[in-house]
Image (cartoon, grey):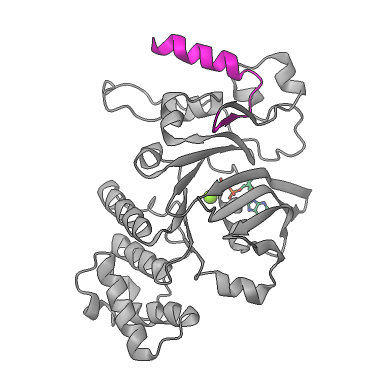
Amino acid sequence: MERMLTVSHLQTAFDTDQGKIISVDDVSFALNPGETLALVGESGCGKSVTALSIMRLLGKSSRIEGGQILLDGTNILALDEKQMQDIRGNQISMIFQEPMTSLNPVFTIGYQIMEAIQIHQSLDKKQARDKAIEMLKKVGLPRAEQMMDEYPFALSGGMRQRVMIAMALASKPKVLIADEPTTALDVTVQAQIMRLMKELCTESGTAIILITHDLGVVAEMADKVIVMYAGQVVEDTDVFTLFEKPNHPYTQGLLGSVARLDADDDTQLVAIPGAVPARYQSMIGCRFYNRCSFAKDHCRTQSPPLSEIAQGHAVRCWEADEVGRNREERYE
Ligand SMILES: Nc1ncnc2c1ncn2[C@@H]1O[C@H](COP(=O)(O)OP(=O)(O)O)[C@@H](O)[C@H]1O
Ligand SMILES: [Mg+2]
């Protein structure tokens, strides 16, 4: 199938008072139309910076230092800002976690959706209004006509997020990036909104990059998964393999910290001890070394490559074989 988005060897850096930080280090993945890729990992692993790199929405102190991003065959890193503006919100849309980038409180819902529609589509006011109402209905908002004249504060968090999805999908984008889109909402609403998002994207062939630390959401939504740790991809696989045969100690740790439905009530969540290192680019050896129960001496001194252990399954770990054997023993 034709690739919709290909990210190859992306490297993104920040200039800080303490010098240069490489936040995303050699990240690669590819998406087909209609496919959902989940980017998972703890806070600070480079997920949002990866997303903002694709949108080319990095601030002044940050830049893409290497790699290639192809959107439906177009190298978007070679485009100027004006060309990029035509792509943003049109061919690639992004929805953020509230309240970071919510709606503007001083304009009506209708005004904001119509504006988003008219930036990219040459529709007159009446047509844009009809399109806006159609999109609001599509995302399951029942009083769409009335809602056009309301202000964001009149809506619940879940309704606001539906409006954001309506705006993001109005142009039938090739790619939708959703960065922790529902973490601010309650669990039932989260699930409804995720399903809706997936349904609309399947309908329009839109590929989704879903950033989440919720592995339940990954299981329900994703086709493929990239696990990131300290700016790097540590495991890259399809969603079934992720849950059935996780082969990086970090992935196993993330899975271990998911509450099991069949667990006793007083079972503690097993979080991974330690924290993501803050300045990871100067580390030699494996970046997960100090948190890893499989670590050997060479893991401290030599940085492991991302290598394919089975078709379509890549892992960045010197001890991947041992980790796999150990997993099989535990589940037998
Ligand atoms: N504006 C910034 N200036 C300096 N460093 C930043 C900035 N934004 C992000 N970073 C660093 O980039 C790394 C990745 O951050 P981010 O992509 O936001 O993580 P995630 O989304 O996985 O939680 C972190 O170490 C973070 O400190
Ligand atoms: Mg983030």
Up-down: is 98 above or below 106?
above
Q: Is residue 266 above or below residue 224?
A: above
Q: At x 30% / y 56%, what residue is drawn?
A: 196
Residue closest to the eye, 157 or 206: 206
- The answer to whether residue 158 of the structure is visible from this angle is yes
Give the x, y percent position of residue 331: 40, 13
Q: Which quadrant holds residue 163? A: bottom left
Q: Residue furthest front?
A: 1
Q: Nearer the viewer, residue 195 or 3?
A: 3
Q: Which residues are magenta?
A: 311-332
Q: Residue at x 71, y 40 (%)?
A: 279
Residue 188 horizontal side relative to residue 166, left or right:
left
Rendered view: 321 above or below 229: above
In the picture shown, does residue 323 fall above or below 119? above
Residue 115 position by quadrant: bottom left
Q: Quadrant of the C terminus?
A: top left
Q: Position of residue 40 (x, y in %)?
A: 50, 41
- Residue 126 in which image quadrant: bottom left
Residue farthest along the left direction in this orientation = 142
Residue 95, horizontal then vertical, whole percent: 45, 61
Q: Residue at x 60, y 52 (%)?
A: 6
Residue 154 in sight: no
- Can residue 313 be found in the magenta stretch? yes
Left/right of residue 47 with respect to residue 181 in the rendered view:
right
On screen, residue 64 versus residue 70, left or right, reads right
Q: Residue at x 45, y 53 (%)?
A: 208
Residue 187 colored magenta? no
Position in image of residue 31 (x %, y %) = 52, 50
- Seen in the image, is 296 located left or right of residue 219? right
